[in-house]
Structures are given as C-alpha cells and as structure tokens.
Image: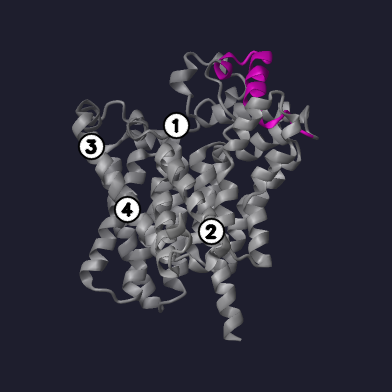
Amino acid sequence: MHYIMTISEKNFNKIFNYFLGLIAIAMIFRKPCTLLIVLFAIFNLLSIKKLNFSKQSLVLVFLIASPLLLEIIMFWNNDYFGKGLKSLEKYSSLLIFPLFILGNYQRVQFFKILKFYSVATTGIILFFFIRFIIFFPELIHKYINGNDLWEMGYEFSNSIGIHAPALNMHLAFVSICCLFFVFKSFHQKEKWILRLSNIILFILSFFFVLFVNTRMALFNVLIGFGLIFFGEVMRKYNLKKVIGTMTVLMVVLGGVLFLFVQSNPYMKEKYSSVTFAYMDKVGKLDEIEHPEFKVFNSLVTRVSIWKSGWELSEKNLLFGVGASDGKPELVKYFKQTNQLFLAKYEFPTHNQFLDFLIKFGILGPLVVLLYIFTIGYLGFSLKNAVVLSFFFLFFTSNLTDDFLLRFDGIAFSGLWMAIFGSYWLQQKLLLIKSR
C-alpha cells in the first residue's frame, strides 16, 4: 500500500491510462469489466490526493452522474427496498468514472486510449469469430447455405455472452474509430505498412458490424462514417483529395456491403418486409398467427410496446411507478389490456426515454436528454467527429432500445463521457494557456 501511495507520477499516469484502455475493451464482458472497475476505484482511492477538480469538471461530474442522482432522489418511490438497491447499484460506475477520470483529466491520453481500444477490440472479436467458426460449424454451414440467416448475429453474440444489439453498438463505435485512424494515418503521412494495417482493421471492424447485423447499429455506423468523412477529410483537404478519398471509401464500403448481402439474402428481407410487416396490428399483435415467429423483432412490436408504455406513464406522470417497478408494472399492464404475446415474453420498453418516464415521471426523460446531450455538447464544442458519432450512436440506440438499464450501456456511456470530458477540459486549458 505504501508503494502505491508513493508511486511516481510517470508510473501513475501509465497505470491510470492502462486501466482506462483495459476497461474500454473489457466492456463487452461484464464480470471481468466489473472487476477492472473495482480495481480502478481502489487504485484511485489509494491515490486520492492526486484528484484535482475545476468548476467545469465538477459540472461534468454532476451531468455524468445525473441518472444515478435521479435514482437516489426517487428511491423512496420503490415498492421494495432490496429491488431498489439492486437498481441503484447498476449506476455506481456513473460515480466512479466521472470522479476518478475527470479528477485526473490532465492525465487522460485520449487518442492513445481510442487507438488501443479500436485495435484490441477488433482483435478480440476476430478471435471470437474464428472460435465461432471452429466450435459452431453447423451454424456456419447453415449460413453458407442461406438457412436461418436471421439467427446468425444473435448466436454469435450469445457465444460471447452479450446481447446482439448491445454488442453491435460497441462494434459500431469501434468501426467508426477505425475509420478515423485510417484518415489520421494518411493525414500524418505514416508509413505504408501502418496505413495498410489501419485499412485492414477498418474493413474487419465493418464486417463484424454486418455479421452481427442489427438494424440501428448499421444505420448508426454509416452515419458515423459520414461524420468522420466530413470532419476529417472535408475540413482538412482540397476538393480533389476529398473526391478521391470519398471514391475510395465508397468503393471499399460498397464492396464489403455487396459481398455481404450476396452471401446473406435475408438482409434484403430484414431491412424491408420483415421490419415493416403488420403495421396495421399495433396494439393487436395477438390477432397475428404465431406472432413470435412473424413479428418478434419487427417495428410493429416495438410500437405496440411504446403505445402501452405511454398509456401506463400517463397514469403516473408526476413521479412514475418507481425504478425497480417499471418493467413489472409494464408487464402487468400488458396483461390488463389482454396483450398476451407481449405479456408472455415480458418485453421491456425498448425506448430509454419512455422507460424513465414510466419509472420516474416527467423528470425521467429530461434527465436522459441532459445525460445524452452532454455528449453532443462536448462533440460540437470540440468539433470532434468521433465524439459526435458517439453521441448520435448512443442517442438513436436509446430511441429503439434502453441501454441505460444495462451494464454494457451504462458503463460504456459513462466511461467514454468521462474520457471525452477530460479531452474537452484539456483543450480548454490549452486555450487559456495560449492567450
């Protein structure tokens, strides 16, 4: 303990940034990541005197911790003390990350962490992909022969131990980061071998997004690519280079996408007829024969859930039903309104704003907006395409899912918000020093 407390500044900085990088890449593995977060907290507590906050960093701490603070303020509204504590515990990382990262904001090596994260995560997913081919040959055989293509991404995600939409949210951000470093390597005129390795990493990362094949992630990754292109190419190069770069990018993306769709014809069906099927049956899913086979992942199911969720929230607009009682009350409402399919599978809200509205009343979605748009503010202030891409990714993902209910959404957003906030504070400090 004495050694840790007297550790040199250089070594402390190294260990601190290693922790951030390791936590980022371990985010898709809940138990190892939780252990790393605990060790990170202990490490910083033993060196607590190193923490240094400015007024701006304290504001950011408050903003990042806002969902946790809302849980504490509304704790009285839970019907069961134990369940309330369990709900509260999920948000503990939203205190650990802002306190210890923003308290050491000058030590954060933003681009090194981002590079380590994108390379290591792509490498880890490649390992699991090879493992999937070896240990699940029957699924690969079905895939090659065009059978049950809808299940492939979910089966691959399950083999890692994470829900497919959550995994693909992470992979979308990784792919966006990989494209950023492709452009960065050309801008900095790195050696051709480094440029080539960055391009290969990018193609691999984009392939994995396509393989897991969730709709919002694919939409978000393409928007992110656009933001990176406009942020990193159009602002820094002349028209001739912009056109040339855009042509190469479109050929690479188009080629990967074309090859993938050719080997996965279900993709055409999924993004058209499957997604928008039975939209005349909103709130009446039981009228569909075998809805679990026909509309389990369709838009009509989500809209039906949202309709019920809104009706439930209208009855509890002021304070909500309580953090631990949101899903049970929603399932109870499904039963009360004779929506047997929704009740049987106990669907969550699939919309973070609506989820917090049900749980906390009118204050809930306001806190979600404050939390997510803090990322947007940091991105616009920094004029940084990576941060803006993360904002767009997390905002839209929470329109069709509820990632502030899950570890892989809470910790993921909290960690990167604190890292982005640290980089923003560093830039502010440089601006003050340059005057």
Q: Nearer the viewer, mark 2 or mark 3?
A: 2
The amino acid pointed to by label 2 is Ile
Q: Earlier in the sequence, mark 2 or mark 1?
A: 2
Above or below residue 139? Residue 180 is: below
Q: Between marks 4 and 2, how big is the CA–CA gap?
A: 21 Å
Residue 118: image x %, image y %?
36, 55
The amino acid pointed to by label 4 is Ala
Q: Between marks 3 and 4, how big is the CA–CA gap?
A: 17 Å
User: Which numbered marker is on residue 120?
Assistant: 4
Q: Between marks 2 and 1, how big is the CA–CA gap?
A: 46 Å
Q: Earlier in the sequence, mark 2 or mark 3?
A: 2
Residue occupied by mark 1: 273
Residue occupied by mark 2: 101
Q: Please state which of residues 420 and 190 is positioned toward the viewer in this rendering.
A: 420
Crowd band around label 3 with a 10 angstrom C-alpha radius: few (<14), some (14–19), many (20+): some
Above or below residue 71? Residue 183 is: below
The main secondary structure of the magenta stretch is: helix
Per the rendered image, the range of residues in magenta is: 319-343
Residue occupied by mark 3: 131
Q: Between marks 3 and 1, how big is the CA–CA gap?
A: 33 Å
Q: Secondary structure at mark 1?
A: helix
Q: Earlier in the sequence, mark 4 or mark 2?
A: 2
- Mark 4 in CB contact with mark 1 (< 8 angstroms): no
Q: Nearer the viewer, mark 4 or mark 1?
A: 4
